[in-house]
């Protein structure tokens, strides 16, 4: 799509969200988080710190994990956005979701959608992460309920680790 | 909530300069937005217009030229961290990058944005200082190259003129035989303290060349040239001792203040400790890049 060559308050955007195309205008200051929650009604993506510290708002843009709270919606123009709602397929949970259920890697669940999207990004890049790689990757994904150990177990499980 | 602003997306440098000159103070360069959007949301900064420079060609190179690493200002932390070239030739830089913020910030945050913002708690700034890095700045009046050690003026302040932008960072390899170390310390996202050391031992195990940089403590990251001078020619054990007893000088050079990262006394103590550790890591380790 064309770049904005004259100063503008809105930007024309074509974007694919969880496989569904969307086309329209977004305000320059509209965040991807606001766009997903308030326009598309995709409330799985959570708002928390709004400063890239906690990870609750994590979504994938062309496979890259980003903090949607601090990512302007027009930046996703011509790209593929994936949110927690896009993981389950035909009523069947994604293997990462299954592993979170199996290991009770959820307490209140507020951090979970972002945590799971972070894990998706990790496994795409590194299908068999070590414990240390998992910890480094999730530095910046905060769980106030302290599910970290269960999350780590779930990841090791889904990645086929033998321990 | 972010207050409304306008967006422009230049596709050339001349268009960028034209736009920045025309709009003056009202316009802000926007790269990854990781600093800018947080500052705007907190109301620390308001901009009527963002100038997205990510479509301007010629600022995304990551390559080796005559032994120097050329990093275009739009290159992200994550790209530096995962680059095969950087991992092979400048492993210390790749490792430093792997500790910056978190993966999401590294996916969008650029090296140009990091240095241009001159936030005192920068990882790359401190490490790049011991390499003797330079920054390339450009405006409609032309290009200039200046040492990174002369780039920072104060917190959030650099020598960049209005309507001038940072286009590239040039990082020379260490001289033959020099090895380096970088240590960041802290419990929050950004480092509370960081130090970088480059050192070369002569055959008689005396320190032949030493470079020392400290960040986060003073208003800007700096090379401690006086300390470098006095360490030169010392035996290692004498060097550790010298660093250990340089508290008064460190306090004078860095002018530490007490803040959420620690008290001034704590910072002076930790700078000494981390410098000793970094020197040991440098000479005992294997980081030639
Ligand atoms: C949660 C969090 C944790 C962080 N942790 C760390 C950390 O551990 N270590 C660390 O070093 N940093 C850290 N940062 C800072 C991180 O934002 C920067 O490292 C990042 O690289 C900034 O780049 P950007 O492209 O996002 O900059 P932007 O936000 O786009 O811009 C920052 C500033 O620089 C200006 N600017 C940008 N590019 C240019 C250019 N080419 N020429 C002139 N001016 C320019 C902009 O006008 C703006 O004033 C952290 C940030 C966050 C939000
Ligand atoms: S809400 Fe986006 S990182 Fe916390
Ligand atoms: S499960 Fe409650 S915040 Fe993570």
Image (cartoon, coloured by chain):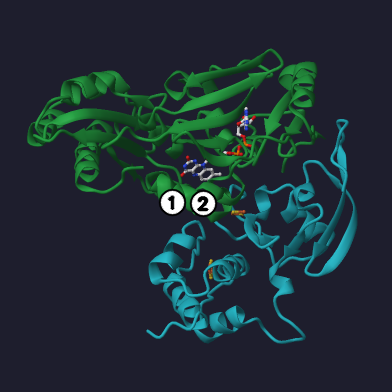
Query: Which residue appears farthest toward the front when viewing the image?
Result: B66
Is A149 located above or below residue B271 in the figure? below
Q: Is residue A15 left or right of residue B231?
A: right
Residue A161 spot, x, y in % from top left: 43, 82
> Which residue in the structure is indicated by mark 2?
B83
Q: Quadrant of residue B30?
A: top right
Residue B182 spot, x, y in % from top left: 33, 42
Residue B186 makes an appearance in the image: yes
Q: Is residue B37 left or right of residue B197?
A: right
- Cβ atoms under marks 2 and 1 closer than 8 Å: yes
Q: Quadrant of residue B23?
A: top right
Which element type, helix, strand or loop, lies under badge 2? loop
Chain in cyan on the image? A
What residue sits 71% from the left and 39% below the top?
B54
Which element type, helix, strand or loop, lies under badge 1? helix
Q: In front: B110, or B170? A: B170
Residue B262 makes an appearance in the image: no
Chain in green on the image? B
Residue B260 spot, x, y in % from top left: 39, 38
Q: In front: B194, or A55? A: B194
């Amino acid at each position: 799509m064309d770049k904005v060559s004259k100063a503008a308050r809105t930007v024309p955007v074509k974007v694919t969200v969880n496989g569904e195309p969307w086309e329209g205008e977004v305000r320059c200051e509209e965040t991807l988080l606001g766009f997903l929650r308030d326009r598309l009604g995709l409330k799985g993506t959570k708002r928390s710190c709004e400063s890239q510290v906690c990870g609750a708002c994590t979504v994938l843009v062309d496979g890259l994990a980003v903090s949607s709270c601090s990512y302007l919606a027009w930046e996703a123009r011509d790209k593929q956005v994936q949110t927690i709602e896009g993981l389950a397929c035909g009523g069947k949970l994604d293997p990462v979701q299954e592993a979170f259920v199996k290991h009770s890697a959820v307490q209140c669940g507020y951090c979970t959608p972002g945590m799971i999207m972070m894990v998706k990004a990790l496994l795409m890049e590194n299908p068999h992460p070590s414990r240390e790689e998992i910890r480094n990757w999730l530095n910046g994904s905060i769980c106030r309920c302290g599910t970290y150990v269960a999350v780590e177990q779930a990841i090791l499980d889904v990645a086929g680790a033998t321990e | 909530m972010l207050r409304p602003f306008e967006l422009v997306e230049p596709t050339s440098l001349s268009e960028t300069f034209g736009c920045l000159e025309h709009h003056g103070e009202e316009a802000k360069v926007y790269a990854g937005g990781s600093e800018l959007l947080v500052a705007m949301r907190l109301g620390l900064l308001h901009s009527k217009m963002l100038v997205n420079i990510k479509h301007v060609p010629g600022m995304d190179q990551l390559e080796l030229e005559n032994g120097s690493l050329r990093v275009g200002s739009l290159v992200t932390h994550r790209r530096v961290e995962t680059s095969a070239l950087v991992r092979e030739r400048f492993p210390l830089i790749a490792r430093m990058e792997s500790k910056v913020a978190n993966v999401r910030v590294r996916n969008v945050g650029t090296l140009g944005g990091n240095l241009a913002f001159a936030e005192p708690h920068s990882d790359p700034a401190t490490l790049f200082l011991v390499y003797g890095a330079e920054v390339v700045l450009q405006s409609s009046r032309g290009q200039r190259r200046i040492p990174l050690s002369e780039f920072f003026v104060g917190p959030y302040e650099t020598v960049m003129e209005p309507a001038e932008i940072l286009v590239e960072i040039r990082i020379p390899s260490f001289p033959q035989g020099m090895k380096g170390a970088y240590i960041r310390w802290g419990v929050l996202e950004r480092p509370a303290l960081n130090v970088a050391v480059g050192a070369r031992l002569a055959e008689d195990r005396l320190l032949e060349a030493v470079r020392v940089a400290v960040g986060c403590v003073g208003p800007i990251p700096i090379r401690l040239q006086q300390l470098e001078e006095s360490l030169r020619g010392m035996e290692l054990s004498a060097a550790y001792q010298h660093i250990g007893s340089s508290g008064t000088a460190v306090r004078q050079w860095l002018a530490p203040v007490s803040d959420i990262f620690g008290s001034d006394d704590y910072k002076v103590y930790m700078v000494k400790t981390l410098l000793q550790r970094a020197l040991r890591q440098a000479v005992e380790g294997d980081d030639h890049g």
